[in-house]
Image (spheres, rainbow, N blue to C red):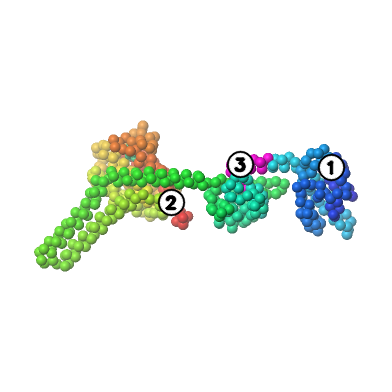
Amino acid sequence: MTLPDSESLPFPGFVADAECRIRYVNRAWHALLGDRLGERWVDLFDEMDANAVLARWRACQRSLEPLRVRGRIVDRSGTTRYFAVHCQPFIETEDAPTELYGLLVDITDEVQQEAENIAILETAVDAVICIDERGRIETFNQAAMRLFGYAASEIIGQPITILMAEPHRSLHDDYIQRYLSTGDRRIIGIGRELEGVDRDGQRIPIYLAVSEIRMSGRHRFAGIIRDLREQRANREALAEQRERLAHGDRLSTMGEMTASIAHEINQPLTAISMYAQSGIRLIERGDADPVRLREALQKLIDQSLRAGAIIERIQRFARAQENQRELGDVNALLTDLLKLAETDARLHAMDLTLELQPDLPAVYCDPVQIQQVALNLIRNAIDAMNEIQCIHGREIRIRTRLLGDGRVEVSVSDQGPGVADDQQDLLFTPFHTTKKDGMGMGLSICRTIIAEHGGVLSFRNNDATGATFFFTLPQGTLDDEQS
Ligand code: ADP
């Protein structure tokens, strides 16, 4: 038996019998490995599991499917080389046992490159895990061992899903299958934040980037995994710091509004005392009409509830709280806030007007923080209008409207001096103030709060006089409701 044109083939080739013994070799093989007739070809290669290859060979004898294996061999000159062995079963004559001819393709460069890659992977800072197309782990570098707590030896060959948290754990096989059959990329080439699970079952926030490696016709996937625990902790610490700053700002606003708050609470207290006195007078006269007495007592209750509501609103506003988001109605938030801000404006002889667009979509927000931003803008408007003698009346307009792109906008317009050209770039800089007692923190805190809500805070000078400060908030979604 000879191979067609096998003598002129640049590849080493051989023919082996059903038991894998070499019966024939071509010139290229001879030059490379010498005459190995009678030896089993599967025994010539290191790093080749002869029994496993034999088992596959038996299956190929029946199906006549080609077989591909790889192995290491030392050639005649003593050089170690790696080959992919492409084997084709064939039957020479009817009833004869299935034999095989094989071609050796030199993959030494490829293997060395792979070894270098693995060496690089081993020292990589990020965890790198390679899996095959069935989702079994093939490589697991040092950083992966540190992150997940498994030794490479115990995890190689295991399904990658043991490192995943639900729902991805159950869905992962479908992901791979869908990708292989449809090419639909959900994560390949796109990074994503997810949760992994370590050896102790602890969930770890991770950033996962997956790339596909196609080698020797096989699909493999490499996942580069970054531990996000520190980043998350930093992010939380930063959020906490911002919240403390925002809380400090609310407290100082409350401090500045002491006069108006005292005034606001004084009103129901005065009324309570009046109704109580008239009750006493009715009793002292000795002809206390139960109906009128009841009326006076009811008014007393109403006024004490009013005072209680004011205090409750102030407490809610001044409380230190963690970011508490909910789907809320901006119009309702502003109407509630006005109860707090109106007295302040009145003390400065100014009117607050609300122009609320009805039926606005809900926004996902922290209500107290949004009220804080609006209150800051209103108080800045009051300060601005106090700076000049307003000839146009003393009105601050608070408006809401729905923008074309679905965002909700809140604006506060005043009739003050507006923002001078040389101030415009500085306005949102922390500690920038043009006021004698100003802190210069209000607008910078407000801008951060709005940015954290996914919106934008800005301003423009009005055509006539004064400035309009406005902020947008994105519409809430169903996901927001569920979270
Ligand atoms: P503060 O009120 O303590 O000065 P802010 O950050 O709230 O701190 O405001 C910074 C500066 O922006 C103010 O000092 C003022 O110069 C300017 N500013 C804010 N609001 C207005 C407004 N409505 N009209 C004109 N200037 C304003």
Location of mark 3 (residue): 124
- Indicate if the residue with disc 1 has its beta carbon within 8 Å of ligand 1: no
Residue 121 magenta-drawn?
yes
Which amino acid, mark 1? Leu
Which amino acid, mark 3? Ala
Q: Secondary structure at mark 1?
A: helix
Residue 231 in view in this figure: yes
Location of mark 2 (residue): 475
Q: Earlier in the sequence, mark 3 or mark 2?
A: 3
- Could you classify mark 2 by the number of other residues whose Cα lies within 10 Å: few (under 14), some (14-19), or many (20 or more)? many
* Residue 317 position in % (x across, y down): 33, 50
Q: Residue at x 61, y 41 (%)?
A: 124
CA–CA distance in space, label 2 to label 1: 73 Å
Q: Quadrant of residue 389?
A: top left
Question: Left or right: 37 with respect to 187?
Answer: right
Which amino acid, mark 2? Gln
Query: Which residues are drawn in magenta?
Result: 116-131
CA–CA distance in space, label 1 to label 3: 38 Å
Q: Secondary structure at mark 2?
A: loop
Q: Secondary structure at mark 3?
A: loop
Disc ID at residue 33: 1
Residue 91 magenta-drawn?
no
